Amino acid sequence: MVIGLNLNVTRRCNLKCKYCGATADCRSSQEENLQDLSTDKVVSILRYAGDAGARVLTLAGGEPFVREDLPEILYAAGDYGYVVGLLTNGTLIDEEAAATLARSGVLYVRVSMESPNEEVYYNGALVS
């Protein structure tokens, strides 16, 4: 049996898509709803879950790439022996982010795209 961990590392996002389950948090004016766990807390969760037998990790959010410490989290996951996947909207993946993904050993990146039609996909969702 393989034990997996799905970890939403943030509720923040650079988009406000109507179809997203995190929409209520993204649109909230209550800043406490959007505060991330510290890097140390996330790494502790990875360590504890790994000690409990978790071997597969999927990082998601919100949008994981809004966290400046995402590379540190990815490297920690690798250090703990996780097979790592990432769920993203893909809009913040640039050359530097792609290089970090490759260096950290992320096995897969799943990009959420609800439509190839720009008018449907962005339908007022693009914020920045």
Image (cartoon, helix red, strand yellow):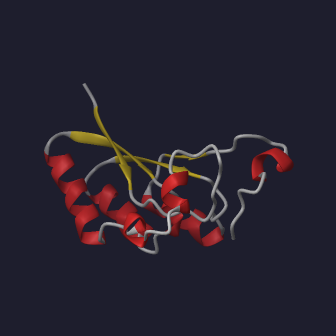
Which residue is nearer to you in this view: 123 or 48? 123
- Residue at the extreme bottom: 68
Which residue is nearer to you in this view: 23 or 62? 23
- Residue at the extreme top: 1
Q: How many marks?
A: 0
| Quadrant in which the C terminus is drawn | bottom right
In the rendered structure, the answer to whether residue 15 lies left or right of residue 7 reads: right
Residue 5, x across and y down, in percent? 31, 42
Seen at 31% across and 48% down, the residue is 82
Residue 83, x across and y down, in percent? 37, 45
**To which quarter of the image does residue 45 belong?**
bottom left
Seen at 36% across and 50% down, the residue is 7
Q: Is residue 39 visible?
A: yes
Q: Is residue 58 above or below residue 10?
A: above
Residue 29, x across and y down, in percent? 50, 69
Q: Is residue 102 visible?
A: no
In the rendered structure, the answer to whether residue 45 lies left or right of residue 120 reads: left
Residue 2, x across and y down, in percent? 28, 30
Seen at 71% across and 56% down, the residue is 125
| Quadrant in which the N terminus is drawn | top left
Seen at 42% across and 61% down, the residue is 10
